[in-house]
Image: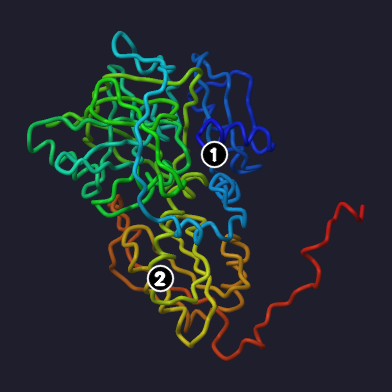
Amino acid sequence: MIFRDIIDFLIRSGDLVEFTKEVDPKFELTAIIEKVQKTSNKAVLFSNVKGYKNCRVASNILGNYKRLATVFNIESGEKEIISKLSERWGLIDTSSVSPANTRKVFTKDFLLKELIPVIHHYEKDAGPYITGGIVIAKDPETSVQNLSYHRLQILDNNELNLRITPGHHLGVYFDKAEKLGKPLEIAVLIGNSPSIMLAASTNLPFDWDELKFAGSLQGSAIELISCETINIQVPVDTEIIIEGEILPGIRRPEGPFGDLLGNYTPVMDNHVIKVNAVTMKESPIHYAILPGNVEDIILLGVPIATTIFKEVKKVIPTVKDVVCWPSLFNCNIQIENTWEGQAKQVALAAFGTNMQWMKYCIVVDTDVNIYDINDISWALASRCSPERDIIVVPNIAGFQRDPYKMQWGRVIIDATIPWGLKEEFERKKIPGIENINIESFL
């Protein structure tokens, strides 16, 4: 599915709330998104954004695992998302197309702030930000392409402030270009297919082209068109494309911004993008993500969980499922426990696959639903001994943007049935409860 197909499907299935009354993009829009996420958790579409007659805004499109399974055609639902996606890990070559030019093209005499909604997310944000944009860039040496999410502060003079995490692919690409005294050409993709969205969240080897990886996730080549002002090809179905260059030798203050951890990032000197052009579909849809909320956690957490599943299963085949939920610092692993001490081995193996995000690893039996925080809490209360089953590993560095070291250290929690006591810890159940339809008894 392309982005617009997802919107249409969610409208037909009743899993999207469309707001037709005028909404202010300064705080009001994000307040509505958060309210919906904390109640029905449906997708949202704003068709009447103040100041923008021809541009709609969508959010929470992949706000739960059921929707994610649907858009990736995983019929068995959320409990097999990770295993099914792990089977698609690979590369499929992209293809170029030359469609009739139906996109609106702006290369001069335009203001970015007039073309796309400038969304103010949180009270103390430095200004409006793009949060659902994916940056595509080429390695200056190898031409391997990378996709990555970045917060982008919109400035008045058709420039964007960009935060690049040191050592990540985009940072390495830019360092190579800057050493040559050259800008790095990039495009910002807003409103993409789910395969592009997940590929941009996945940490892959440096020699993997992430557009080709996105093709593998959807099972077919990503179709590309050439940009207007830079030497980059981009997915043909993207709603809005911003073309530009990250400028060498220039850093400007950016922030504060209400980020992933729920607080504000400090003001920092960050990179600058000079915007050269914008192209967009007719009546485009701007895609916004609330940082740290459910959709953000799913988009970032699914690739992490899939990597953990793939790697740990190589050494311990009885791993059944993995999810990073309800935060990126939590990893819940479901196993079929076949020997004493296996759960702790699984947790150690999982920590070895991801050095940045995972802080807590909870291992449970197959009768525990790892997508349900209440079920996880039950397993902790009934099957975990604080004296025997909780191991703290201190002084291990974690999340890179953590100046206070709050994410340092690791915690292993074995919440599986104590070895040899399966009958004593058998979970109670009511026969036939899964077939009960309450409505039929009213």
> What mark, if any, has residue 326 been given in the picture?
none
Query: Marks 2 and 1, how far apart in space?
Result: 30 Å
Question: Where does residue 198 sit, x and y in percent of width and height?
Answer: 43, 46
Relative to residue 91, is residue 377 drawn left or right? Answer: right
| Residue that numbered label 1 is attached to | 60
Amino acid type, callout 2: Val
Please provide percent x and percent y for residue 412: 42, 73
- Total labels: the figure holds 2
Q: Residue furthest left?
A: 180
- 134 relative position to 395: left or right: right
Spot occupied by residue 247 in the image (x, y as percentages of width and height): 17, 29
Question: Along the line of sight, which residue is nearer the eye, 337 or 8?
Answer: 8
Amino acid of disc 1: Asn
**Upstream in sequence: badge 2 or badge 1:** 1
Label at residue 312:
2
Q: Secondary structure at mark 1?
A: loop
